[in-house]
Image: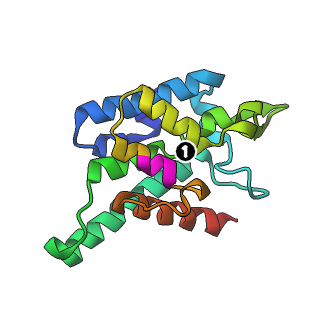
Amino acid sequence: MNVLKILPEIKAIGDTDLQKKVVAVWEEAADFRGWTEELLLAIPFTLLAPNVTISFIDHVRAVCRMCMAVDEVQEELHGERRTKVNRDHLIAGALLADAGKLLEYEIVDGRSVKSSFGRYLRHPFSGVGLAFKHGLPEEVMHIIATHSKEGDGEKRSPESIIFHHADFIDFELVK
């Protein structure tokens, strides 16, 4: 699977070592169940709403781009007064927050369903595990860990706040 082809936003990460680690997480997650590019472009991004027509990859890319846009607007309009954001960490976290869904989901009878693994560990947990294994910075793991309901009550970093809201914009509009 060509991760850079389906997730070209990886190239927006300035740190090439971080780019490689993001690709490695996606490759391992895809290999876990044999996810192909075609399947990833076809499966819905959530199982929490009926009749979702937005694909998993389209969701990941859209939310990542929303995060980059928020950072750009903040920089343009607030300049030095803005809360500092590590753009590379923001992009990496945005691209990896849902990578754990490749462990959480499986295809049964042509449909995406929650796997046995997914019934015990939701994607923020498995995503952090993959990120840790591949040496991602703790700031990126924080975004993955706190992006969903698992992060409620936790103090989120600026990058996690941006991602959390961008993710829920896309989710709420589909739901």
* Image quadrant in which you'd find residue 80: bottom left
| Badge 1: residue crowd in 10 Å (few <14, some 14–19, many ≥20) | many
Pick the front one: 136 or 99: 136
* Image quadrant in which you'd find residue 103: top right
- Residue at point 75% right, 58% down? 49
- Identify residue for label 1: 98
What quarter of the picture does the C terminus occupy? Answer: bottom right
Pick the front one: 26 or 1: 26
Q: Residue 17, position in %: x, y? A: 26, 30
Q: Residue 64, position in %: x, y? A: 43, 53
- Residue at point 64% right, 49% down? 45
Q: Residue 173, position in %: x, y? A: 62, 69
- Residue at point 57% right, 21% down? 31
Q: Is residue 66 visible?
A: no
Q: Is residue 95 left or right of residue 116?
A: left
Q: Which secondary structure type mostly characterizes the magenta part of the structure?
A: helix
Instruction: Tell me, yes or no, whether the highlighted magenta stretch contains residue 145.
Output: yes
Report the amino acid beneath label 1: Asp
Instruction: Tell me, yes or no, whether the highlighted magenta stretch contains residue 7.
Output: no
Seen from this angle, which residue lies furthest left?
80
Q: Is residue 128 visible?
A: yes
Seen from this angle, which residue lies furthest right?
109
* Image quadrant in which you'd find residue 20: top left
65 is higher (above) or lower (below) than 34: below
Q: Is residue 36 left or right of residue 134?
A: right
Pick the front one: 120 or 76: 120
115 is higher (above) or lower (below) than 33: below
156 is higher (above) or lower (below) than 55: below
Q: Which residues are magenta?
A: 142-146
- Residue at point 30% right, 40% down? 11
Q: Residue 88, position in %: x, y? A: 28, 47
Element on which disc 1 rests: loop
